[in-house]
Amino acid sequence: MSAPIVVHGPALTGGRAVTINDEIVGLVYNDQGLIALLRRAGLYDAEHCLEDPHWIEWRGGWPHQYRWGNS
């Protein structure tokens, strides 16, 4: 079973698209924005799920990086 939340690779202009159960729910630019988005979607302990592969899959880039390169 794959994770229900996917944080997709960084866009060239910055930010990462987020899908929940294959539905696009937003674009985030940092971990705080991701946590806020997940809380609005009903995941109230979102900050504890960022490192849990059962909840979140980070695709196309390193976790917690929201721009291409080292920034």
Image (spheres, rainbow, N blue to C red):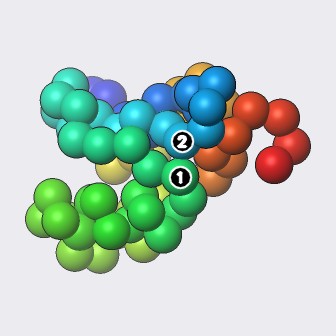
Q: Residue at x 81, y 49 (%)?
A: 71
Q: Amino acid at mark 1?
A: Tyr
Q: Is residue 66 above or below residue 59?
A: below
The residue drawn where x is 32% and y is 29% is 2
The image shows residue 61 at horizontal and vertical percentages of 66, 31
Name the residue that disc number 2 marks.
Answer: 15
* Residue 38: mark in rendering: none
Viewer can see residue 33: yes
Is 57 displayed left or right of 69 in the figure? Answer: left
Q: Is residue 18 above or below residue 12?
A: below
In this rendering, position of residue 66 left or right of residue 54: right
Mark 1 Cα shell of 10 Å, populated few (<14), some (14-19), many (≥20): some
What secondary structure is found at the residue carrying circle 2? Answer: loop
Residues under numbered marks 2 and 1 in contact, where contact means CB atoms less than 8 Å apart: yes
Where disc 1 sits, the SS reads loop
- Three-letter code for the amino acid on which mark 2 is drawn: Gly
- What residue sits 47% from the left and 30% below the top? 8
Q: Residue furthest right?
A: 70
How many numbered badges does the structure rendering display? 2
Most extreme residue toward the left, as rendered?
A: 42
Q: How far across and down, in percent of the image, does residue 16 sit?
A: 49, 38
Residue 29's label in the rendered image is 1
The quarter of the picture where residue 33 lies is bottom left
Q: From where the camera sits, is residue 54 visible?
A: no
Snapshot quadrant of residue 46: bottom left
In the foreground, 45 or 67:
67
Q: Earlier in the sequence, mark 2 or mark 1?
A: 2
C-alpha gap between disc 2 and disc 1: 4 Å
Q: How far across and how far down the image is residue 13, in percent?
A: 61, 31
Image-based side of 26 in relation to 35, left or right: left
User: Which quarter of the rendering shows the N terminus?
Assistant: top left
Mark 2, Cα crowd under 10 Å, few <14 / some 14-19 / many 20+, is many
